[in-house]
Amino acid sequence: MDISVYRAPPSDGLLIAPLDEFTAVYHRASGITHLLTDPAPQILVAVQDGARSLDALLVHLGRDYDLTDGTREALAARLEELVEAGLVERA
Amino acid sequence: MRHAFSVRIGPVGFRIGSDWRAPIAHLETLYRDYPKPLDGVPDFTVRLFARRPWRRFLRPSVEIGGDYMLPEAAPLPLRQGLLAAEMAMNLQMALGARRYLLLHASAVERDGRALLMTGVSGAGKSTLATLLAAKGWRFMGDEFVLLDPATGLVHAFPRLISLKNEGIAAAQAAWPDTRMGPLLRATPKGDIRHMVPDARAIAAMDVPARPALLVFPRYGFDPETRSVQPGEAFVRMTQASTNYVALGEAGFRGLTGLIADVPAIAVDYPDGPRAIEQVEALWADL
């Protein structure tokens, strides 16, 4: 079972600019601009308020954003991509 | 170097040195109404040189260099020396500019508001800017638009207008009295002729403008306009910027600000007059 807890990078690590279905995110540490689509921008917002577990994120995204079509595995995969890119950290 | 010339184009000062007199003579003539670099200090230095001493005379070919170089840049024959000078100046801007986000675009201004046009080579950036200027718009530049990330304003860079192929005749028809450089046949981009921007463009080159419309023109198609979504416009503009990555956070803020504030429209057009109509209609609807 995945007991990881996810959190945002250190404060002000990201600049986030919603465009349309895409959100542009500037990662200060690497200088790389990422273009994200659902549910990645919502995940970034969700972990800004504090560290959350995978299950807590699943509940939160389903409740606040109606992102209920994703499975637990799909969300875990998205989180892994964000961790890989440095946009989310494992606490 | 043996021959040298200094000029200021918009906020950017250049010093061009050359092993040959001819390219400098062209620059002196065509840029004669432009100011010199502020305080006499150029931002960029450009060199036109012969790789081997005898190459000054024997099949002379012009290598370009300066503060920033592209090692694979091919030399040009001396008769295309003016093109070499302009390419070298562009190269210094593209690789070296840090104060502004450089957008590979043309721009014209009316009532303090700027229309930006960007696209691949041959899309009609230069020709459309020239035709619009003949209709009363102020010409700001045909190659680079300088976006100040701190203010969101665009600054003019009205260098010589680089007309290509059919664009040469179209611009000459619109500006019959303008001064032109030599016709450079069979360059890597086809026939090229440099045109001096009109006096108003030079006189007002220090006056920035607020971007109001971003157009992606495409020449040779039935007339059509369509809205470009912000995500697509953002991606296309990161590709159209030569220093987006180098500017880091300032580039991100500048570009996302531009995309948020300014509508982006793709304009397909069959000929210059029709394009002018399409652009004027879009402008009227803002």
Image (cartoon, coloured by chain):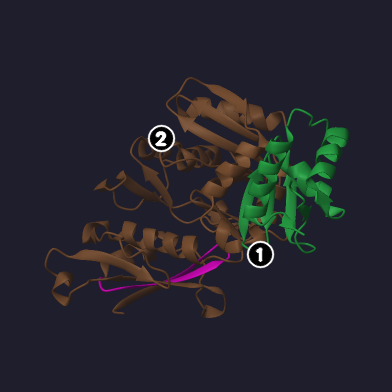
Q: Nearer the viewer, residue A52 or B104?
A: A52
The magenta segment is B6-20
Badge 1: how crowded within 10 Å, few (<14), some, or many (20+)?
few
Q: Chain of mark 1?
A: A
**Which quarter of the rendering shows the C terminus of chain B?**
top right
- Can residue A69 be spotted in the picture? yes
Residue found 44% across the figure and 54% down from its top: B160
Which x, y percent locates residue B211? 68, 46
Residue found 22% across the figure and 72% down from its top: B51
Q: Find chain B in the image and tell me its colour.
A: brown
Indicate the secondary structure of the residue bearing disc 1: loop
Residue A66 among those drawn in magenta: no
Residue found 69% across the figure and 37% down from its top: A73
Identify the residue under disc 1: A29
* Helix, strand or loop: magenta stretch: strand
Q: Find chain A in the image and tell me its colour.
A: green
Identify the residue under disc 2: B170
Left or right, B188 with respect to B102, comes to left
Farthest top residue? Answer: B222
Q: Nearer the viewer, residue B5 or B154?
A: B154
Which x, y percent locates residue B49? 27, 71
Left or right, B114 with respect to A48, comes to left
Q: Nearer the viewer, residue B182 or A4?
A: A4
* Amino acid, disc 2: Ala
Which x, y percent locates residue A12? 78, 62
Indicate the secondary structure of the residue bearing disc 2: helix
Left or right, B232 with respect to A7, comes to left
The quarter holding residue B90 reads bottom left
Which x, y percent locates residue B186? 24, 45
